[in-house]
């Protein structure tokens, strides 16, 4: 191949790349957060914060999207959080046929789409507690897997999640069926979001986690609701986890209320009770938060409390955080 042929092919390849790039839309977004954290209470991890009381988080997300000739839309995103990949996502929107997406590393699937059901001006009340049961779910937190979603009517949206056995588990508070083996379990779950009436949204979900070892299975049921009326939003949630392993038997109930003082300032309060079937003492969580936004800058603070951690009477923890975040 002579140099003129090489030059011609190089120019053709460059043209094809330019055409492909022109058909797709790309965007880059990011966020930065500076925080001060304080802990207290009874426990070895209290009155100290790993790495110091001051901290910084940062993330960058690259998004790409394009429309296929048949009208379907394809989108993809890649997020780096603190220098580590936190999520990769590929989604095919098939219009009336619904949407299929694949999440790698840390993505909400199926029942994990039911999130933030307790309204808060900042983080959830279990934030900052390693012993707290995140989101009231066992195993159906975030993971590598598939999700199918479809709006089947003006009122109902369905999400079906599937995590193949052997997929990598991720996400704070995720407890997998593989806790007893070296191979992660498989997970299937379904979640419904129902816009029942103006201001009222109902969430219902069910999930099954089949362990890699016989006799290590978990079943999860979630029911929650949010109601917004003017500046006030209230939320209630209930979760039941029926497990073959006694230490993963849970019943949780919680409620929260948030009030928007104006379009920039809001406050909230939440409580939750965790009944661990293997112990006689309930775990109690509570917290209040305040948030103020001004364009791309947000100032938030929360004070969360955890009593009877892991069902042990008298083992209490406190977590307070003040943070300034910037989005760009």
Image (cartoon, helix red, strand yellow):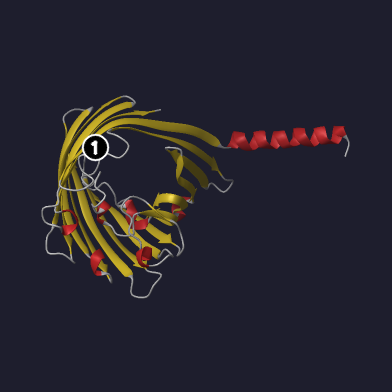
Compared with 314, 268 (above or below) is above
Q: Residue furthest right?
A: 2
Whether residue 231 appears in this view of the structure is no
Compared with 246, 127 (above or below) is above
Q: Quadrant of residue 180?
A: bottom left
Q: Which residue is pictured at 31% across the width and 57% down the height? A: 192
Q: Determine whether the residue tagged by mark 1 lies in a helix, strand or loop.
A: loop
Q: Quadrant of residue 10?
A: top right
x%, y% of residue 67? 54, 42
x%, y% of residue 134? 27, 52
Compared with 317, 283 (above or below) is below
Classify residue 5 as left or right of residue 40. right
Q: Which of the two residues, 74 or 84, is positioned nearer the viewer here?
A: 84
x%, y% of residue 212? 41, 70
Q: Which residue is pictured at 35% across the width and 61% down the height? A: 176
Disc 1 target residue: 122
Q: Quadrant of the N terminus?
A: top right
x%, y% of residue 195? 26, 50
């Amino acid at each position: 191949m002579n140099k003129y042929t090489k030059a011609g092919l190089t120019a053709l390849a460059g043209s094809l790349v330019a055409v492909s790039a022109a058909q797709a839309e790309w965007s880059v977004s990011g966020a930065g957060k500076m925080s001060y954290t304080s802990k207290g209470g009874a426990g070895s991890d209290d009155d100290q914060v790993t790495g110091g009381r001051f901290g910084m988080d940062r993330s960058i997300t690259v998004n790409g999207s394009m429309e296929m000739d048949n009208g379907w839309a394809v989108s993809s995103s890649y997020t780096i959080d603190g220098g580590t990949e936190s999520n990769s996502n590929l989604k095919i929107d098939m219009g009336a046929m619904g949407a299929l997406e694949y999440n790698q590393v840390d993505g909400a699937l199926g029942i994990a789409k039911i999130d933030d059901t307790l309204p808060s001006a900042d983080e959830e009340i279990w934030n900052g507690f390693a012993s707290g049961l995140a989101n009231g779910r066992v195993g159906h937190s975030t993971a590598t897997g598939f999700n199918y979603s479809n709006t089947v009517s003006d009122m109902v949206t369905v999400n079906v999640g599937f995590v193949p056995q052997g997929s990598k588990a991720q996400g704070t508070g995720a407890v997998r069926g593989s806790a007893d083996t070296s191979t992660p379990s498989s997970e299937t779950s379904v979640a419904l979001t129902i816009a029942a009436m103006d201001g009222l949204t109902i969430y219902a979900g069910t999930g099954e986690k089949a362990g890699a070892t016989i006799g290590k299975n978990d079943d999860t049921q979630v029911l929650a609701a949010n109601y917004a009326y003017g500046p006030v939003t209230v939320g209630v949630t209930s979760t039941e986890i029926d497990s073959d392993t006694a230490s993963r038997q849970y019943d949780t109930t919680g409620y929260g209320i948030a009030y928007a003082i104006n379009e920039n300032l809001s406050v909230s309060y939440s409580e939750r009770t965790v009944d661990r079937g293997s112990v006689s003492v309930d775990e109690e969580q509570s917290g209040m938060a305040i948030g103020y936004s001004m364009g791309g800058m947000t100032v938030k603070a929360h004070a969360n409390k955890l009593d009877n951690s892991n069902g042990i009477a008298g083992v209490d923890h406190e977590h307070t955080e003040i943070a300034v975040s910037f989005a760009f």
